[in-house]
Amino acid sequence: MIEKAWYQKAPWLHLLRPLSLLYRVISQRRRVRLTKHAVTFDVPVVVVGNISVGGTGKTPLLIYLVTLAKSLGFNPGVVSRGYGGQAKHYPIKVSDQTSPETVGDEPQMIFEKTSVPVVVDPNRVSACQYLTDQHSVDIIFSDDGLQHYQMGRQFEIAVIDSVRGLGNQQLMPEGPLREGLSRLAEVDLVVLNGEGPFSYPGALTYCLRPTAFRHLASGDKKTLQIESLGSKTVYALAGIGNPLRFFATLTDLGFELKTIPLRDHAPINKELLDQYRSLPLVMTDKDAVKCQATAPDNCWALSVEAEFAPNEAEHLTQLLKRIVNPNGE
C-alpha cells in the first residue's frame, strides 16, 4: 500500500518524482485559476483542513471549535464535502433523518455532536450559499477544503498528526502532500494532534481525551473502567485515518486488544460486526454513526473530546472573537 510507503519513507518512491512535478504544476495552476474566481460571503469562513492525504484528526478539532463558538454566543454552521456519501442531490442539510450513507460519516457525526446546521455539497461555495440563505449563522466552519480555493475564507487552520507527521514530505504520488510544505507558512494557524516527533514553530497542540464508553444499542454511557465493559480483552475497530492512535488510547486505558483496522470511511454493517460477538467491541464515534441502528448488543463507542492546555484554549477563544467581530463590536 503506497500510504504505508509514504510514512516509512520507502526509497523507491523517488521513481514517482516526475509525476509529483507534474502534479505540482497542475495544482499551482488550479489554485491561481480558482482564487481569481473566489466567492466571499457575508459571514467569515474558517477552514479546518490539512495539506496531506488521509485523516489527521481535524474533525474532533472542528467539533471543539464549533462547541466553543456556541459557548461564546455565536451561531456557527458547518459545510462539508460529505466524503463517502451518496446523496442524490446537493446541497443537502444533515438531520436526524439523514444517514452516513447519504451525507457521509463525518458530517453526520458533526451534526449529532453539535446540533448546528451542517450542509453537505462537494461544491463548498454552493454549501456556504445554502447555509447562509437558510440559517442565521455568523461564522462558517469548513470541514476540510483547504484546497477548495473558490471558497473564500478569512482564516485557515492546518491540522497535522504529530505522530505520523507528513511522511516523506513529498507531493503526491511520491508522498502524501496535497500541497508543498511551504503552504504551512501561509495558513493562519497550525494545530498538532497529540504529542509526537513532528513539530512546527508556533503550532498549538491538542490531545484527544477519552470521556466515556457509549453503548450503541441503548445509548447508555459508562465510565472508562475495564469493569464497565466486563472484559479486559476487547475487539477494537477503527475505520479512521490512523487506527493505531485509537488502539493506543484503549491500550492506555488498560485493555488488551484484538484489533480490527479498516480503511478510512470504510462501511460498517451488521454482517461485519456479527463476526465479532464473543467479546465487547469498541469503535470510534465516527464508525459508530454508521451502524448504531443495527449494532449488536456487544458494541460500544469510545467518546473523545479535543483538549487544549488552558493558555492555548484561551488563545482560540480570543481568535474566534476577533474573527466574528473584527472591530471588537
Image (cartoon, rainbow, N blue to C red):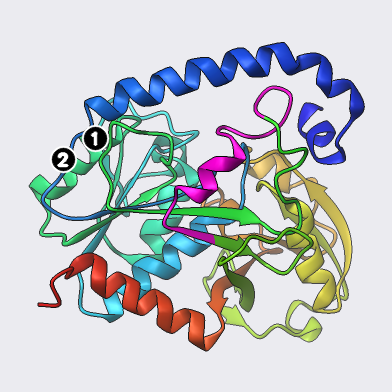
> Does the rendering let one see residue 292?
no
Q: Is residue 119 left or right of residue 186?
A: left
Question: Which residue is painted at 68% across and 67% down in the image?
Answer: 194
Say few, some or many: other residues with alpha carbon within 10 Å of mark 1 (under 14 / 14 to 19 / 20 or more).
many
SS at badge 2? helix
Q: Is 105 placed left or right of 170 in the picture?
A: left
Query: In the rendering, at what x and y percent does residue 24 appear?
Result: 56, 21
Residue 195: image quadrant is bottom right
- Cα–Cα gap, marks 1 and 2: 6 Å
Q: Is residue 53 above or below residue 114?
A: above
Residue receiving disc 2: 129
Asked if the residue under mark 2 is in contact with the one under mark 1, i.e. CB atoms within 8 Å, the reply is yes
Quarter residue 233 falls in? bottom right
Tell me where the magenta segment starts and ends, as one range. 171-190
State the SS at label 1: helix
Q: Which residue is mark 1?
A: 125
| Magenta region includes residue 187 | yes
| Type of amino acid at the residue the image marks with label 1 | Val
Residue 32 horizontal/vertical position (percent): 35, 24
Q: Can you see residue 223?
A: yes
- Asked if residue 43 lies in the magenta stretch, the reply is no
Nearer to the camera, 63 or 187: 187
- Main secondary structure found in the magenta portion: loop
